[in-house]
Image: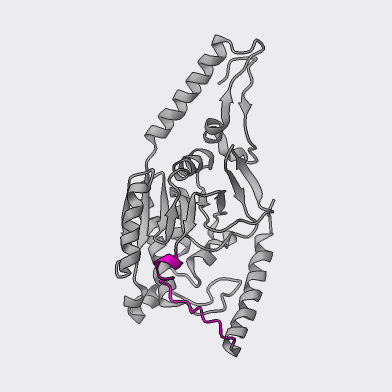
Amino acid sequence: MLPAGQESTVHGCLSDSGIGANGLSCYLQRVPDSDQRSKESKAVSSWLKNQVQQWWDNVNYRAFVISLERAKERFAHAATLLPQLPLEGELLPAVDGNAMSPDEVGEVYRQRQHRPIYPFELLSGEIGCFLSHRNAWRQIVERKLDAALVLEDDVCIDQDEFGDVVEFAAKICPPGAFVQLPVRPLPSNATVFACGERRRVVCPQVTPLRTSGQWVSRQAAEKLLAVTEKFDRPVDSFLQMHWITGVRLLAIEPSGLSDMTADLGGSTIGVSKSRRLTFQKLSREIYRAWYRWRIARLSSVGYR
């Protein structure tokens, strides 16, 4: 504890009591006393820094880059990401949904399982993508990691920023967190969870789609594995339903990641990008709008 009569100076805003010492460690800048910089205040500041470093040195983190081996260009790009990461990491081969038998699909995929009902049948690539992320969550749990950085193979890393982003996520976000590292702008009305000099952690009312990058704690991975033995929608859509998963996603901006999907030949999911307007496409857009309205409405319950 701080010596009597001294107060910490905290830079930023901390809106969640669950941050605890991790949040304090990143935000505490100095411990002044009434007589400017006394020897006592410097000693306390030095002690706090040592405590933070000891904590940082003893945590068990790892990085996983998910990539489909048959997508040669993307798999090669994924290998180039590993030396750019601030953590020890490895390639995690993606599940190839196209190679799954109907029986294998039936073991994990069950339509209309949760409300709001997802209005579309999943593509084989979407099933494989979901199973690939489940595999990453399983690795976190089975290896008893405190948390892991999980990336897909279509991101570009800003090496000047990304190390700070990962450290920020690890030190600021509370135990049990699942933190998105988005490649798209976040909604401007997101609740600010914590903020630093160059980035902030926010809680969007509606969890943004895409799973390009994320920081996943073991507690979050355990919860997600428990509720996704069978699933009925894409993984990013499932993660929006915090009332089912028990995990409300946070996000860091800026994330230090950008999207390279177009440069790598497009998505491996198999979603058609045709611009031709047909009755089928029009009906899909109507169903999609209805579904997203339902998600937005449910997401607003209990939102602060």
Q: Any magenta on residue 134?
A: no
Whole-percent x, y for residue 252 in the image? 55, 48
Left or right for 281, reference 226? right
Whether 128 is drawn above or below 301: the answer is below
Magenta range: 261-277
> Is residue 229 among what the camera can see?
no
Farthest front residue in view: 263
Pick the front one: 55 or 166: 166
Whether 174 is drawn above or below 251: the answer is above
Whether 3 is drawn above or below 49: the answer is above
How many numbered discs sit on the rendered protein? 0
Whole-percent x, y for residue 201 in the image? 58, 46
- Identify the main secondary structure in magenta: loop
> Is residue 140 among what the camera can see?
yes
What residue lies at 41% left-to-right and 76% top-to-bottom? 124
Whole-percent x, y for residue 215 in the image? 46, 50
What residue lies at 50% left-to-right and 40% top-to-bottom? 168
- Tell me the quadrant of the picture where the N terminus can be found: top right
Farthest bottom residue in view: 279
Whole-percent x, y for residue 4 in the image? 62, 14
What residue lies at 40% left-to-right and 56% top-to-bottom? 137
Left or right for 184, reference 100? right
Colouring used for the render: one colour
